[in-house]
Image (tube, rainbow, N blue to C red):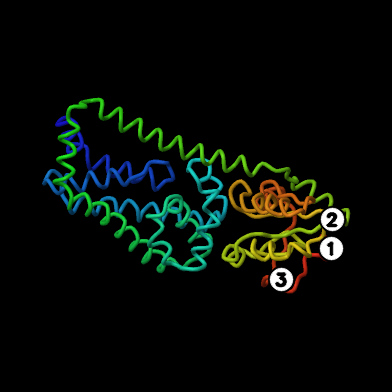
Amino acid sequence: MSATVEFLVHYGYLLLFAWVLAEQLGLPLPSAPILLAAGALAGRHRMNLELVIVLPIVTVVICDSFWYELGRLKGMTVLQWLCRVSLEPDSCVRRTQDRFERNGPWELVVAKFVPGMSAVASPLAGITRMPLQRFALFDGLGAVLWVVGYIGTGYIFSGDLEDVASHLAFLGHGLFAILLAGLLLYVGWKYFNRWRFLRKLRIDRISPEELYRRMNAREDIVVVDLRHTLEFEAEPQTIPGAVHMDTAELEEAVDVIPRDRDIILFCSCPNEATAAQMALRLRYLGITRIRPLAEGLAGWRARGFPTLALESRDESSNIPGPVRSR
């Protein structure tokens, strides 16, 4: 165990920086154990307390600023990329958007403490065009609380953690194997849950090409834009003829949703999660002619198909009416 402690003392600052950086870049590596360990070593005067606090805070602020700027410039494409490397952004994007709408910038303060939301909060702030000064203030406050919370806990209970370490000393090098196995099990379980979530979303989708062809053929179809209000207000470009509704409004309209024509739902979230979930829910309620748009709004735009700028949400639109390409 003494060799492990010496390793942490010798490479602790580099390990602390690299681990926090990896998590903030979207990799599934929880930083809490490293922060606790750094706090405990600082409590035993084996590491510098000020440095183990400042180093991760600076790392977090730099990474979050990078994600904010990327979200502002690239929009939802950033979350599509994060979905490939993170554990659950596709299932928590909508939750984070809802929380942003309720809590505003205060959501940045607590995002680091909520599993799955830390990875998407900063790019969402950029996507929704949160002012840079406000983002920096609240994100910095969140970074300080997150780092100081874990470092402080490790520091306060450093004596207890040292006792635990001494009791585990008999494991020798086996302790590293146990910790590694625990980390792999954690990551594996998270990926399994994500695979199970995506498996639920398996539903027949309509391609952008097919939708474009049918709209040009003047077919009676209903196209519904399910993007969150924050995202829609930041970028009010939509598919021509689409009705913008949130999921709650669409579900409330279930009794008047037409059963005699196809209904196409689209969003811009990773894996079309919101549209696919809503399509499955409405199918369960008896609306069978409903499909999500494959690749969402991003796929539509990528093919050069037209979009229409709307000044505000079409609150007066009734979904039963035919919606055609304009």
Mark closer to the chain start, 3 or 2: 2
What is the quadrant of the N terminus in the image?
top left
Q: Secondary structure at mark 2?
A: loop
- Which residue is denoted by mark 1 in the rendering? 322
- The residue under label 3 is 314
| Residue name at image x 65 percent, y 55 percent | 267
Q: Amino acid at mark 3?
A: Asp
In this picture, residue 39 sits left or right of residue 28: left
Question: Which residue does the image show at 17% across and 53% down from the upper left?
Answer: 156
Q: Residues within 10 Å of mark 2 (few under 14, many from 20)?
A: some
Residue 23: which quarter of the image? top left
Amino acid type at image mark 2:
Arg
Image position of 5 (left or right of 303): left
Q: Residue furthest left?
A: 45
- Compared across the picture, whether 127 is left or right of 254 comes to left
Neighbours of disc 3 within 10 Å: few (<14), some (14-19), many (20+):
few
Q: The disc labelled 1 sits on which kind of residue?
A: Pro
Nearest to the eye among marks 1 and 2: give it. 2
| Label at residue 261 | 2
Q: Are the two marked residues, 1 and 2, in contact with CB atoms closer than 8 angstroms? A: yes
Reading the chain from its start, which is encountered first: label 3 or label 1? 3
Question: Is the Cβ of the residue at disc 3 closer than 8 Å to that at disc 2?
Answer: no
Residue at point 22%, 54% (across, down) = 152
Residue 77 x/y as whole percent: 57, 50
Task: Name the residue at the bottom extreme.
Answer: 316
Residues 86 and 68: in front is 86
Badge 3 vs badge 1, beta-carbon distance below 8 Å: no
Residue at left 14%, top 49%?
43
Q: Secondary structure at mark 1?
A: loop
Question: What x and y, as percent, mark residue 58?
Answer: 30, 54
Residue 270: x and y in percent read: 58, 48
